[in-house]
Image (cartoon, helix red, strand yellow):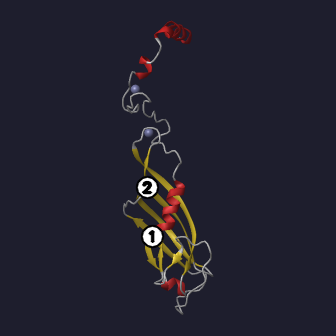
């Protein structure tokens, strides 16, 4: 996800480029988008380049209830300003703002979106991912996936002394 932006940096403030993003599946620690796609705009600003766009990310998540992997789609609203390390015309070092994690255009005028997209993907992930809203999860007793099969744990642990009461309850519900 690297773009050489030397030409755009030479243009006046307000100049733009439309950039297509189409990233093949990849996987790395703690971050495994199965694909990123979208259209972005690079806008020449006074200090650097503003990257804006809508990126669709497909991400593999683990369901917090049944522990199955599933693929989720996230919509990333990207807006991030990148700052050149050197002046494209003079080659001189540029003063950089303090908070520039992943948003520096390197000395070869290459803008790398990897780190910024990684952060956006992580921010878009739910804290407790669910494969579906009504996921039944795993049985606390035997561990079967209750989405796929039923178990008799619930019945087996019921105290037989309560059986009479349970029957009464069933009758009153009916
Ligand atoms: Zn689930
Ligand atoms: Zn069970």
Q: In the image shown, does 107 or 48 lie closer to the viewer? A: 107
Q: Residue at x 41, y 17 (%)?
A: 156
Is ligand 1 closer than 8 angstroms to the Cβ of mark 1?
Answer: no
Residue at (46%, 58%) from the top-left corner? 57
Looking at the rendering, the quadrant in which ligand 1 lies is top left
Q: Residues within 10 Å of mark 2 (few under 14, many from 20)?
A: some
Comparing 81 with 85, the one in front is 85
Judge whether 140 appears above or below 35 on screen.
above
Image height of 140 relative to 30, above or below: above
Where is residue 33? Give x, y as percent. 42, 58
Residue at screen point 42% across, 27% down: 141
Q: Quadrant of residue 169?
A: top right
Q: Position of residue 87 (x, y in %)?
A: 55, 88
Image coordinates of residue 98 in percent, x first then y, are 62, 74
Q: Nearer the viewer, mark 1 or mark 2?
A: 2
The answer to which of marks 1 and 2 sits earlier in the sequence is 1
Q: Residue furthest bottom?
A: 90
Circle 2 residue: 58
Q: Report x, y in % for residue 115.
A: 49, 67
Local packing at callout 1 (Cα closer than 10 Å; few below 14, some 14-19, many 20+) is: few
Note whether 50 is above or below 73 in the view shown: below
Identify the residue position indicated by label 1 in the image. Answer: 20
Element at label 2: strand
| Above-or-below relation of 58 to 48 | above
Q: Secondary structure at mark 1?
A: strand
Q: CA distance from mark 1 to mark 2?
A: 17 Å
| Front-most of residues 160 and 33 | 160
Q: Quick check: marks 1 and 2 in contact, CB under 8 Å?
A: no
* Residue visible at 46% across and 10% down in the picture: 160
């Amino acid at each position: 996800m690297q773009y050489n932006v030397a030409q755009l940096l030479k243009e006046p403030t307000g100049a733009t480029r439309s950039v297509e993003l189409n990233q093949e599946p990849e996987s790395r620690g703690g971050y495994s988008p199965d694909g990123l796609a979208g259209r972005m705009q690079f806008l020449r600003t006074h200090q650097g380049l503003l990257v804006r766009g809508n990126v669709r990310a497909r991400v593999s998540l683990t369901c917090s209830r049944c522990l199955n992997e599933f693929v989720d789609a996230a919509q990333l609203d990207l807006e991030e300003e990148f700052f050149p390390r050197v002046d494209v015309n003079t080659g001189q070092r540029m003063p950089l703002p303090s908070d520039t994690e992943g948003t520096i255009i390197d000395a070869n005028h290459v803008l790398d979106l990897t780190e910024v997209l990684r952060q956006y993907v992580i921010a878009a992930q739910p804290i407790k991912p669910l494969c579906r809203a009504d996921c039944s999860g795993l049985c606390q007793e035997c561990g079967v996936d209750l989405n796929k099969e039923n178990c008799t744990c619930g019945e087996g642990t019921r105290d037989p002394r309560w059986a009479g009461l349970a029957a009464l309850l069933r009758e009153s519900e009916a």
